[in-house]
Each structure stands twice: as structure tokens, then as C-alpha cells.
Amino acid sequence: MGNADDVPVLDSNSVDRLRRIAVLIPAYKEDAVIVGSVIANLKQNYPPERYDLIVIADSFLDETLEELSYYPIQVIRVEFEQSTVQKAIVYALNALPENKYDIILISDADNHMAPDFLGRINQAFGQGWQAVQGHRKAKNTNKSVAVFDAMNEEVNNNIFRAGQRALGLSAMCTGSGMAFDPILMKRALNQIKTVGGYDKELEMLLTVDHIQVGYLEHAIIYDEKVQNVTVFNRQRTRWIAAQLYFVKAYFGIGVQQLIKGNVQAFNTLVRSLLLPRTILLTVLGLMLLASLFVTNQPLQVFCCALFGLMAGSLAISIPASLWHKISVRDFAVLPSLIFGMFRSLINYKQASKVFIHTPHAENPELTNVS
């Protein structure tokens, strides 16, 4: 199998063939951003006749649907008693013609693919990959919360995607900017029952079948970052609920896979056992502070080493371009984010039963888009 981590700049002569790609865009009440995203995503260098943008419209306004009808895209209208991304994608997959597409790609309603994104996806599949994750990058850094959210995304990219691939392990899926073989994806998604966090289950089911997820560092897809503390906390509550559900549902399966020698699947479980970074860093900081009041030098060194290793790993995983966007004033929002993360641990049960939608802004400042 080829190396999906180093897909070169593409041209028509550097690929085996141009595969048919379906770009599924599950969207729940995303009237504010969907038209702008459609316009941006139609600017691909990939031949227009070889890909389709398919908006899965859940609870859209009639005027939005009418506006979308003017663009060369497909719209699949859905309505569920309890809406989830996974339900929307499964519905669309079952509605698509059999064997029409070679690749299924998932994009969020606010995502903007770089012009060469689909070309890089196509070349990775030409190298033998059946599942790949693109490089999600912040579309906006116009607010303090958005900058920290962008930093969190890049930590995931460098540690849990690029870092995992450097160790020969499967890259972590992240919900959008990811592409799959249609048969594999349909089979896996039909087994998923979670309300949120379907990407974790999808990755586990793939690795159980010994399918690795590649990471395309240079295949950029821009993602809108959260811009206020309230929405940030609601989003993290949903993520924590999904993480706890995943651990409960797949702990036994992960251990069984390790016994069978499937390190890839067990690694997916291990990642889910990690505390959220904000909480872990805070706990380690409090441990270090408490150790200063104990006359036990080995304990102090141990706590200092743990905190330093954690903080240092996070610091070097964040690109310099994002550090340059941070000011002293931005750190004032950190206590609210940290408190919100701890509160999410208490409120997670609500998110495990009801899908919590993350609203997107109409015109975010696209500071990172060239």
C-alpha cells in the first residue's frame, strides 16, 4: 500500500484514473452557511463530471432549498423524529444508486474544501487506501475561543493523525473531511447506534476489519471554529457523551481485538480512554501545585515532569501561525473554557439522549483561507 501521508501535488498524468466521488454534506438547520459552502466547494480542480455535491437537508427553510436548486448539486431532503448526522448519512447512502461512486466523502455544512482536495483524495485511493482523513484546518480565528479551538484541531492533527501514522497506526477520524470506500462505509454505518460521535465508532469498526485510516496532511479542508463559550461548552458536552458511550460500548471489543493481535483496534480504544486535554492539563497542574506543599522531592519531580511533558507536547503540536494570533487578553477566556469542560462531565447524560446541534455563523472571518 502507498503512503497516504505524502501525496504530491496532482496533475492529470499523475493518477491512475479519476474516480467518481460523492461529497455528502449532512446539514441540520444550516440555512445560514450552506449556500456559501456549496459555492466554495464547487471550485474544485477535479473534473465537475467526476464528483457530485449532495446536501442532505434536514429541517431547512423553503427559501434555502429554492436557492440551492439554482446550483449544480443534489439535495436529499430528510426529516427524523430525532436527527443525527449518522442517520442522515445512512439515509443518503441507501438513496444513492448502487455502484455509481468509487469514493464517499463526508463534509460538514460549514466546510470549504481546498481546490485540490478531491484530487488528493483520488490519488490516495489510487495508492490502495480505502479510508483516509484529510487535514481539517481552522476557517476562522476571529475570536479568542476560535483560536483555542483551532489550536485543539492542530494538536489532533499532529498527535493523533500525523503522529499515529508515523508509528504505523491508523489515523483518528474527525467527522468531516474523511473519505471511504462506499461498501465499507455503508456496512460500518449500518452498525452504529450512537446519537453523536459516529466517527469514533466508524473508525473502530474499520480497524476491527483491519482497515487502516490514512492521513493526508496536504489535503486541506477548512472548518469553522466555535466563536463563543456557550456553544463551545455545548459542543464539548456532546463530545464527552460520545466518548463515554464509546468506551462503554467498545471496551470489551477493544480488549478482545488486542488478544487477537489487532493492535490497530485496541489503539482506537486506548485513545478514547484519555481524558480531554483541557481537563488533563488542569489536573496535572493542580497536582504540581499540591506537590509544592509536600516535602517529598521525588513526588515534586514526578509531578513537574508529567505537567512539563504534557504542556510541552501540546505546545510543539501547535503551528507558529496560531501562536502569533494569541494575545494576553485571549487567555482571559481560558477559565470559562476549563470550567465548562468540567461541567460537561456532569451534563453528558443529556447529550447522550438528544443530539446537540452546533450552530454556525453566517459570515465568519476567513483569516486562514488563501
Image (tube, grey):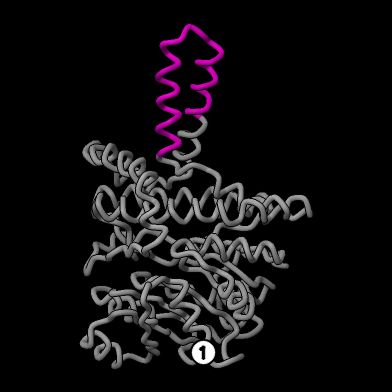
Q: Is residue 97 visible?
A: yes
Q: Name the one closer to the observer, 87 or 180.
A: 87
Q: Nearer the viewer, residue 56 or 40?
A: 56
Q: Is residue 61 left or right of residue 299?
A: left
Q: Is residue 263 magenta?
A: no
In the image, the segment drawn in magenta is 279-308
From what the image shows, is residue 41 above or below residue 139?
below
Where is mark 1, residue-wise?
A: 96
Looking at the image, residue 118 lies above or below residue 318: below
Q: Split into 4 quadrants, where in the image is the N terminus? A: bottom right
**Residue 292 within the segment the image draws in magenta:** yes
The main secondary structure of the magenta stretch is helix
Q: Position of residue 246 (x, y in %)?
A: 54, 55
Q: Residues within 10 Å of mark 1 (few under 14, many from 20)?
A: few
Q: Secondary structure at mark 1?
A: loop
Judge whether 307 appears above or below 279 on screen.
above
**Residue type (three-letter) at the residue carrying disc 1:** Leu
**Quadrant position of residue 126:** bottom right
295 relative to 139 in the view: left or right: right
Residue 240 lies left or right of residue 12; in this view the side is: left
Which residue does the image show at 42% across and 58% down from the upper left? 352
| Residue found at x 25% / y 77% | 31
Give the x, y percent position of residue 260. 79, 54
Residue at horizontal 68 percent and vertical 66 percent from the top: 211
Q: Position of residue 137 (x, y in %)?
A: 41, 60
Q: Is residue 42 visible?
A: no
